Image: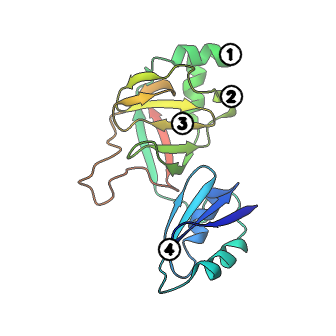
Amino acid sequence: MSRVLPYGESALLVETDAPLGLWDVAARLPGVVETVPAERTVLVRFDPAATDARSLSAAIATLKPAGPPLAPGPSVELVVRYDGADLGAVAAQTGLGVDEVIARHAGAEYTVGFCGFSPGFAYLTGLDPALHLPRLATPRTSVPAGSVAIAGTYTGVYPRSSPGGWRLLGTTDADLWDAGREQPALLRPGARVRFRPT
């Protein structure tokens, strides 16, 4: 079920339960110049010279998104040292051993559902349900860059040092955000991600 709302003169905001299945489908509609997925919405920017809000809204309303993006994105492997400050606590809270937490986290293939929080931070879907834990009750004032973490149904990697309340499982040296690259973000919506333990 989707609801389409006006968002300025050249964009629509689509509220949906399936943003990951909608953003790439909507991107193919005539006149669309960009789609930006979030957890429960997709921002659809369009060229007013090529289409109008009413026509595009009607077209979006007929879309039936389901499942992952139609065309899987690029594959990215991140090498991880499972040395995070919360690894032992996650094991204790889930009733799993530390080795099992690592095996379950590294054993899944994730999909970048959307990006946000800070440049280069990707929310990765596909986390094993056994590892679903809430954010920390009290966030840390500083989380080191490259920290691999979990919160709720997501896993992600902090691209730079920042405050944060996710549970830290490990670290990676991957450069998640480089403004000098043609594509600054290493992880973009639709990309498939695997973690490889060192």
- Contact (Cβ within 8 Å) of mark 3 with mark 2: no
Residue 198 seen in the figure: no
Mark 1: few, some, or many residues within 10 Å (few <14, many ≥20)?
few
Q: Residue at x 49, y 54 (%)?
A: 191
Q: Going from the N terminus, do you reach mark 4 or mark 2 first?
A: 4
Q: Going from the N terminus, do you reach mark 1 or mark 2 first?
A: 1
Instruction: Give the secondary structure at mark 4.
Output: loop
Name the residue type under label 2: Ala
Frontmost residue, 96 versus 155: 155
Q: Is residue 105 left or right of residue 17?
A: left
Query: Which mark is drawn over residue 130?
Result: 2
Residue 26 seen in the figure: yes
Q: Residue at x 41, y 35 (%)?
A: 158
Name the residue type under label 4: Ser
Q: Going from the N terminus, do you reach mark 4 or mark 3 first?
A: 4
Q: Residue at x 67, y 78 (%)?
A: 59
Name the residue type under label 1: Gly
For residue 170, above or below residue 125: above
Choose mark 4 or mark 2, whichever is in front.
4
Q: Residue furthest left?
A: 180
Could you tell me residue 45's position as x and y percent? Answer: 50, 70
Query: Which mark is drawn over residue 177?
Result: none
